[in-house]
Image: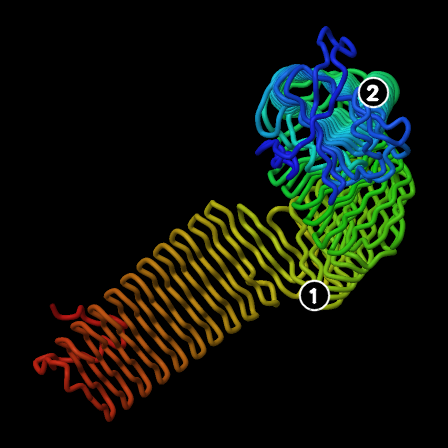
Amino acid sequence: MRLPSWLTGLRRGRRNRHRLPVAPAVEILEDRTLLSVYWNIDGGSGHLSFWADDYDSIVVSAPSGVVQVAGQVAMGLPATAVVSIGIDAGPYNNLVDLSAVNEITFPSISNGVDSIVIDGGSGIDTIVGSWFDDTIYGGNGDDAIWGSAGADTLYGDAPNAGSGSDLIYGGDGNDVLHGGDDNDLLYGESDADVIFGDDGDDFLDGGDGNDILSGDRDNDMILGQAGNDTLYGATDPQANACSWCDPPDPSVINEPGNDSLDGGGGNDSIDAAAGNDLVFGGAGNDWLVAGDGNDQIEGGLGNDSLFGNLGNDQLSGDSGNDSLSGGLGDDLLDGGADLDIVQEQADTDFTLSDSLMTGVGTDYLAGLEYARLIGDDGDNRIDTTAFSGHVSLSGGHGSDTLLAGPGPDMLNGNGGSDALFGGDGNDTLNGGSGADMLEGWLGDDVLRGQGGGGDTLQGGPGLDSLDGGAGHDLVYEWADTNFELEPTALHGLGTDTLTRIESAQLTGGASSNVLDTDAVDWPVTLNGGGGDDTLKTGGGNDRVFGGAGNDQITSGDGADTLLGQSGRDELHAGSGNDRLDGGSGNDDLFGNDGNDRLRGRSGNDQIEGGSGTDRVFELVDGDIALTNSQLHGVGNDDLVAVEEAWIKAGSGDDLLDASAFSGPTTLIGGNGQDTLYGGSAADILYGRQDNDLLEGGAGDDSLSGGGGDDSLSGQAGSDTLVGGHGHDLLEGGLGDDTLLGRNGDDSLSGDDGDDRLDGGSGNDELVGLQGDDLLIGAADLDTLLGGDGHDRLLGGGGADVLLGGDGDDTLRGQGGFDTIAEGDGNDWVDDPTSIIDELFVYLPEWIDTNSPPNPPV
């Protein structure tokens, strides 16, 4: 603490000073005899100095305009000449009394820095300040200080030194009191005071006014009394001295101590800091904060805020509408009378009932009507379904799950993709950012998707308001009732108001329900559930599931998917390219406009494609026979206006026969030894696994054997045959065909037409037969027979046999020890890299009988 400049000079020497004569033994004060004091007046500055060397009394007054000390005239000094006063009481037990120094008796003194400064020095002093703004130091010893009137600064000890158990009264005015070391008693009394206990076990009493009280170190008792007070167990209130109306930050924790703090009357702010503290708010709306330790907090009268923080705390709101937060630890929270709220925030899961809350500990609850719980960055689950009061839940930034109770609750998902579930009351659910799911349940609820995510909103029973917000949002509902969907309303479990909704999903129950959405152009999903349902959609791309029962399904514009499922169903597609699946039972499928895909499944179905290019679709583990008017296999289906077919076999040895069908067909084998017959159009046949037989029939077909040793016959048309894995037999048949052997030792025969044969890997046999053919042996030991026509034979790598046959042929061995014979016609052998076996003799019957020799080894 800085010493005033006059006091520093006073202690350096006492020369040129006048002794004030006083009568000996004029009075007895505190069993002491008044001896003598000294004074000095600086005529230039008007500063009056006093000091004492013994057990003295310095009682200053000016009853008749002349300065007196202890009733004795001080050399006739007029009081008007005094501008400031400084007193050094010395090292003994002294009395200093300036209670008679006021604006009337000393009119030249004004409030300012160092106007009145008193240093009690050592000893047990009694000091009474003036009516001005005094600075008083008790010094060493157990001192009693009273500030009187004015905005005083009172120190129990000396600046930066000294000790003693002091008694300090602020008096009138906005005072600052410092207890210093040891155990002090400090009373602010009237007006707005700032009180520091400092070291020791102190007692602080704010008195009237809006006070700030800080116990600082050790174990203190703090009473705010009347006014709106701020109490700290162990903090520096100067940091908050300008925030009289703002509560302190409850997270500020300084030095420990087991304190007792009582706010008294008024709206108090108390921070007990660390230690096992007792905090009493008293009357008024108080802000009560404990720190580390097992604390007990009582709010008292008024609307109080109680914070336990760390430790196992006991919080009691008493009367008034109080807020209780236990913090970490296993706490006891009792709201008391009126309407009280429990509040917590943490990155954890909370479970709340009327008597218990788990999350940041295990808290026992009583007398609480409201709850406010907040998560954080993690994925938090906050479950208040067993709490009968009102709740406000906020999820934080993670993907959270919030579950309300039976009251009218507020749920805020905030960041992340959250799931919000209302309860029985009239709830408000705000999804925030992310793709959120909001379910209002019972009551008249308000659901807001917010953000730009794709939200799902379910109002539940009641008159609900659903606003999807930005993004593509879905209204969802299920119940055993009828639903009717309009662009701005959903009728069913009530009439819900819809805003910014772009899609819908509705599900019926066990009864026969009507789900009608033909008034909207959004994409919708309907599920009839049990019963004989009537399902209608509008202009979007819709999905409809009939469920159990004999259902009637009608779709509108758009590319729709209709599934009858079990029962005898009737499916009517609208315009657009639709997919119809009858499911089990004898179903009726009507394709209408567009290029539709129709599947009857089991049962004897009626399948009508309508206008457009329509396809019958089936998956079967068994035999199928397809004609233009019927499909026999999984049932006996009648076909009308069906132009295409797509059929896939199962795991057994299946027969897929589409030879009597005139439209394009796709036949796909399964895992068994399958037989696939195409029809008269351009078909696609794929054998897949095992040893399959594929015949394309008429038309330009595409045949692929897949795995196994397959037999492929293109028959009529310009076909493409691919052997795949295994030792395959490929016959092109009529037309200009392309045959690809791929892997394995394959046999390729072009037959009529100008064919292209490529053996691929393996020791292959390629026979062109009629037409101008191209034969490619590729790698390994291949045999190429051109046959009739002007053929080109390319042996590839390996020791190949090339026989030109009739016609003007071109033969190229392409490397290796090849055997080449020209045959009839003007042939051209061009292969400088091959070694020709000139001893080889060609027999014409090899071509006629399609029996070429084995290639040389």
Q: Considering only vertical position in the picture, is 113 above or below 543?
A: above
Determine the residue positioned at 80% across, 46% down.
448
| Residue 717 higher or lower than 622, as above or below | below
How does the figure colour the protein chain or chains? Answer: rainbow
Which of labels 2 and 1 is toward the front?
2
**Residue wearing tag 2:** 71
Seen as rendered, the residue at the extreme top is 31
In depth, the one of 5 and 525 nearer the eye is 5
Out of 610 and 189, give the one closest to the viewer.
189
Where's residue 232, x and y in %?
Answer: 69, 26
User: Horizontally, is 807 left or right of 237 in the view?
Assistant: left
Where in the figure is residue 488, as x and y percent of width and height?
89, 53
Q: Quadrant of the C terminus?
A: bottom left
**Residue 357, x across and y down, in percent:** 69, 21
User: What is the secondary structure assignment of the residue under circle 2?
Assistant: loop
Q: Residue at x 25, y 64 (%)?
A: 762
Q: Amino acid at mark 1?
A: Asn
User: Is residue 373 shown to the viewer in this render?
Assistant: no
Callout 2, which amino acid? Gly
Specify whether 746 is left or right of 557. left
Residue at the extreme bottom of the image, as rendered: 826
Q: Earlier in the sequence, mark 2 or mark 1?
A: 2
**Dot 1 crowding, Cα within 10 Å, few <14, some 14–19, many 20+:** many
Secondary-structure class at tag 1: loop
Residue under circle 1? 595
The foreground one among 128 and 819 is 128
Q: Is residue 64 shown left or right of residue 641?
A: right
Q: Residue at x 74, y 64 (%)?
A: 576
